[in-house]
Image (cartoon, helix red, strand yellow):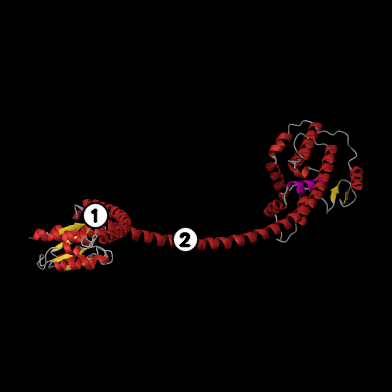
Amino acid sequence: MPGFPFHVAGGSFNPTRQPLQLFESMLNNAPRALAPTPQPSRRRKLWEVSHKFHCPIIGTCFDVAELRALMKKVMHFTHDTTDFVLHTTAVGACESRGQLSELLQKQLEKRFHQTIRRFAAAKDTSALQALWQEATSSGSEIPAALWATWSHPACDSTLEHAVYGDIHMIQHQIGTGTRADLRTLKALKDENRELRQQLDKARQENESLRAEKSSETQALGQRIIDLRAELAGRDACIASLTGQVDQLRASLPDLKDRQNLSRRANDAEARCTALSAQAENQETEIWHLRQRLRHAEETINQIIAQENPEEGNPLATTCPAETLSGKSVLCVGGRASAIDGYRQLVEQSGGRFLHHDGGLEESLHRIDGVLASADLVICQAGCISHNAYWRVKEQCKRTGKRCLFVRNAGISSFSRVVSEACALDE
């Protein structure tokens, strides 16, 4: 390994020298007898392997931590002993048989027993060399192949030096790769540091968001609890009200019929409202027609008065005085210009005149009191509202009072009705 000298037969060399000089030194210091030598029948022990190969074996086959643990079992050394001192001590102990060399031998045999068994199938040097080259090309089991080759009985000096050269170059390649790996590792560390900073920032943001979401979740949970309590209170109130409704229904067996009647009354009221609106429209139209009729009657009366002065005075055809005998005559409706003529006719007949305009300006509620004090009712059907007409008719029918209806609002028509009333009284 680089950094300390290897012991070689016939001398020593420093691996810090140039590779070509190292290789020439290895060739010059190699044993001269490269001729075939008798192969031993058993595998070599660690202390039986040439001492210059102990350094590659210890450095390649044992990790530093593992080597420290194994050496601690058979010797004592301080805690601050460097890895280099432990390595050189182990290499020196492998030159002879001892506790440490036997422990390392046992560990090598135990760890690489499968590869040793596979290499044991090689019966000559060429087969062993083929297995070694196969192991170095794959690069997967170089420590196991190194020990299995150098401890094999068929490994001669030529193959030993070939393996030594291969493992030496492999160590150089590993050193070069290690330097590249260190540069890559430094770049990865810088990138990892930056990513860690980004990760810490993301974690802080995540913690902030998590705290915010946690507070929102707690607020929503409390809101849900409040809503559930409110819902439970509403459910209890609904249950109580439902019980009260059931009790009311049980206490009112005809509630369903009343509800049906209420719906029918509402429907009738709606129809009545529609009919009232329609009646108001018709009353408006009737009022316009009455105005036109009143105007036509006045025109006709004026023409008749001009042609027959005597017939034009309706007061001449009234019944004799005192015929009504103080009875109260109620006139409902009529033209405003003819009210004084109505009053004169009734008073000349000995009666007392009462008047109501039929709801045009006066309230319909007042008509009930006027009807109660009247003995005879003369209703101008063409000059009152629809409601007043039916109200007068129903009130007279209920009280049994005489009610005479006049279509024409003229004084002549009113005089004839008064005359008929006088005749009926006689």
Residue 100 in the image: above or below residue 140: below
Q: Which residue is drawn at 25% across and 59% down?
A: 387
Q: Position of residue 112 (x, y in %)?
A: 70, 41
Magenta range is 52-61
For the residue carrying disc 2, how many other residues have a C-alpha within 10 Å: few (<14), some (14-19), or many (20+)?
few
State which mark lies toward you, 1 or 2.
Answer: 1
Which labelled disc corresponds to residue 220?
2
Which labelled disc corresponds to residue 304?
none
Residue 266 in the image: above or below residue 351: above
Residue type beneath disc 1: Asp
Q: Residue at x 82, y 40 (%)?
A: 163
- Observer-nearest residue: 25 or 258? 258
- Observer-nearest residue: 329 or 255? 329
- Observer-nearest residue: 210 or 60? 210
Residue type beneath disc 2: Leu
Q: In this view, does 412 lie to the left or right of 137?
A: left
Instruction: Please identify the dominant SS of the magenta region.
Output: helix
- Observer-nearest residue: 85 or 260? 260
Which labelled disc corresponds to residue 246?
1
Question: Does label 1 or label 2 sit earlier along the sequence?
Answer: 2
Question: Circle 1 sits in a helix, a strand or a loop, which is it?
Answer: helix
Question: Circle 2 sits in a helix, a strand or a loop, which is it?
Answer: helix
Q: Where is residue 258 in the image (x, y as percent from the top left)?
A: 22, 53
| Location of the C terminus (image quadrant) | bottom left
Residue 354 appears in the rendering: no
